[in-house]
Amino acid sequence: MVERSIAHAGRACIACITCIALASRAAVAQATPPSRAGAAERVIVAASATGPITLDGRIDEPAWAHADVAGDFVQQYPTPDAAPTQRTEARVLYDHDALYVAMRMFDSHPDSIAATLARRDYTGYSDWAQVVIDSYHDRRTAFRFAVNPAGVRKDVFEFDDTDEDVGWDAVWEAAAHIDSLGWTAELRIPLSQLRYGASSGEQTWGIEFIRDIARRDERDNWAPIPADFSAFVSRFGALRGLSGMGGARRVELQPYTLARVARAPGSPADPFWSRNALSGGVGADLKYGITSNLTLTATINPDFGQVEADPSKVNLSAFELFLDERRPFFTEGSDIFGFPIALDWTLRNNYFGDDRPFYSRRVGRAPEGKVPDDAAFRDVPEATTILGAAKLSGKTRDGWSVGVLDAASARETARWSDGSAVRRREVEPFGNVVVARLIKDFRAGKSAVGGIFTALNRHIDAPSLDFLSRAAYTAGLDLRHRFDRSYEAAAAFLASHVAGDTAAIARLQCSSAHYFQRPDARNFRYDPTRTSLDGVEAHARLSKYAGAWRWGIVGHAITPGFDANDAGFTRAADWLMQVDWIGYEHLAPGRHVRSWNLYANQRSGWSTGGEHLSTVVSLSGAVELNDLWGGDAGFDQELPALSTSVLRGGPAMRLPSLTMAWADLHSDARRPLSLQLSTSAWREAESSGRGWSVSPTFTLRPSSRVELTVGPALNRNEDAWQYVATPTAAGAPRYIFGRIAQTTASLTTRVDYTFTPRLSLQLYGAPFVSAGRFSRFRMVTDPRARRFADRFHTFGAGELSRDAATRRWAADLDGNGAPDLSFADPDFSIRQFRSNAVLRWEYRPGSTLYLVWTQSRDSTDALGAFHPAHDAAALLAAKATNVVTAKISVYF
């Protein structure tokens, strides 16, 4: 069996092959030739704002005329180090409350300025004026503020020199104005939104000014960045002249109130159902500047009703799906809680790029307790209530980064009816998560040593919840060191400890992350009397990240008992992995080609018991033309290897070789209509399994205030050995597989309509259908046989029978006419529709009104065949759940 969907496999393949290529392409976007590397640091002096600044986008106040001018910009792209096609100037003023930035973007063709009207943090086609401020002056972190000619704002937190957090939001103001000379922008950035060390003397901050000219896909920088290594914040210029920066008073309060009505299908006989369920709530967010560097952020009874729903997926693998965090409290400042233990490479039946000691989706997740399966009616909470959360974060001037997070979740109770009475059962205990992170920078941020600690404690009183661990801890150390301007070494170590009742640790040992019950395991055994589980994870790498030629060597180890899944994410333990890669980057634009690269890598994995789990070789390349068409392509060749998870607790089984190819294409995004196309295909010659996927995305901008995105996707998966069940026959487990013919289709549609930069309407809709039909059922007989056919016994027509009433298959193994084992019919048809409409009005800076309408429809049956017309009709016929929410927050 190949435990993956084609869509996931294509994404994982792209991640494993091109993660370095994409990072290098980002470096190209910041590139200037080596001749600039030794250039003197750019300096601009901030002037005191001697009079009031009217934020209207016009630079006509007298104070601007006396301010220092930052000019002499250079291109980042398309032609590194060349003179810009249009001139740009920037100025800086300050007072005791705020920093003011003015930028004049000269343009010989003002009618061609791209002034797209969009929602805040828009990343599409538009001109932009940006200022990025390294107020810590640590050459590692910075705050980016951008405005486009229509007055649309964007803010980003930069960290680790080249990484960024687009979920960070600050309370600031900006305005822009188009005139006959081009356009101008004024930004007012309150000092309370920045982090810096208090001082009565003069301070020096890092600063960068950036201009984007959309019609040319041109980016111009004030402070050049060398092309021979990947860098951003570390190459900023200097902002001087700031004096008397004693630290702004930072107390921000944002209470909210909401009203919600939900209308869901149900039965009048259901004691828990109401045709119109009304609810409301109040809560608040608080930010308090303990010092000018450290900020306490707290939330009480948070609500995330305006957050877009997770996309629909069908998971046929043994492993948990990783879901991106979308909730603002957890996305903002998440960089400091990151830990570099993840390995962003794919090995057969596993993807390690999501492993981490802290996974914020664990906070407020769905309760894990259950009610009886035969309950006539039930009322189970969809999510655990977050009572409150707080985090302390910041960075000192001497290079210490500090992050502490604490979140408490409520005890949850479910209700159900057995037809005669309403009963209650606790389905989630009170829980508390603590995360602490500490990092010390050295050598102006080129080296660092850090540590992390996480703790989850549950107060379990109900015997029905003894299957949950009572305590889970991780502790780790990490370090990195850059040699000159080309090489970097990094290492990380993480230890875990999980404790609980024997039922909890037994469940953990048998989970898909461990499978301690494997009968052929060489280096561990299942122990039902254990009350704790311990393990370690380690990671080391050496890489050359600069120059035309780039390479890296990576080693990774996870012991069988390591588990961070209570507060973090661990897909699978018991791995030893080795990765090496090499690539070439061509950065100089030619007559037709703007840039291109070529990368090759090899990766192998073993269990700690010495079982060979994977060997993969890959080749990939990317090219971008001068007309901004481009694409990526590559292939993976996976060699035969063992899998210790495919039998889901059974012995290791040999996997056939697999070949996978993929290609992406994108058109010129400057056009009103643009296209992105992703395709992939795979084949197992030995098993005759195959599959393919195609996913085009069309983006249409009919006007400067409307953007429509339509993304259909179609996947076909014909897997010859998809896991079905593990029934028992003659006292022994039997592992049943089948050939699946699965088709998955979806249509993700987004419409963004912007009335003003502060008032927008977003529509999202995503119908999803996945149907799978099984045939040629087979039973594992010799899991390590060299030939694929010898690993299974394929059931003949006389050996299997199906009971239509119970929808179960029965197998007669000894030919005596009596069934020896049975399993449920695995055919499925899943149909879902998720949509929401969000009207967002920022009626004053930091204060927002949301009107949200969400709708969901679900339909399932055992048809197993993909019939578009029938599936669409079934989805439309499904009764909808509608939820309307009005939420208003006020910023003080």
Image: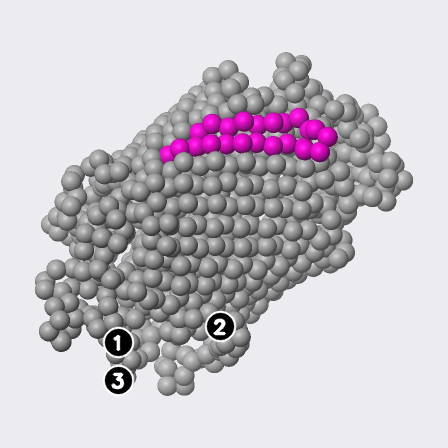
Name the colour scheme: one colour
Residue behind mark 1? 802
The spot of residue 63 in percent (x, y) is 81, 30
Is residue 778 found left or right of 687 in the rendered image? left
Label drawn at residue 867: 2
Residue behind mark 3? 420
Q: CA distance from mark 1 to mark 2?
A: 23 Å
Q: Please state which of residues 461 and 326 is positioned toward the viewer in this rendering.
A: 326
Classify residue 406 by image quadrant.
Answer: top left
Q: Please state which of residues 723 and 100 is positioned toward the viewer in this rendering.
A: 723
Is residue 663 found left or right of 728 in the rendered image? right
Earlier-in-chain disc, 2 versus 3: 3
696 in relation to 381, above or below? above
Is-magenta flag for residue 630?
no
Q: Please state which of residues 569 and 846 is positioned toward the viewer in this rendering.
A: 569
The N terminus, quarter of image? bottom left
The residue sitting at 57% across, 31% down in the picture is 597
Earlier-in-chain disc, 1 versus 3: 3
Label 3 neighbour load within 10 Å: few <14, some 14-19, many 20+:
few
Q: Secondary structure at mark 3?
A: loop
Is the Cβ of the residue at disc 1 closer than 8 Å to that at disc 3?
Answer: no
Label 1 neighbour load within 10 Å: few <14, some 14-19, many 20+:
some
The spot of residue 21 in percent (x, y) is 53, 34
101 in relation to 315, above or below? above
The residue sitting at 53% across, 50% down in the picture is 679
Q: Amino acid at mark 1?
A: Arg
Say if residue 595 shows up in the picture.
yes
The main secondary structure of the magenta stretch is strand
What stretch of residues is rendered in magenta?
A: 581-603
The residue sitting at 44% across, 73% down in the picture is 859
The spot of residue 3 in percent (x, y) is 35, 53
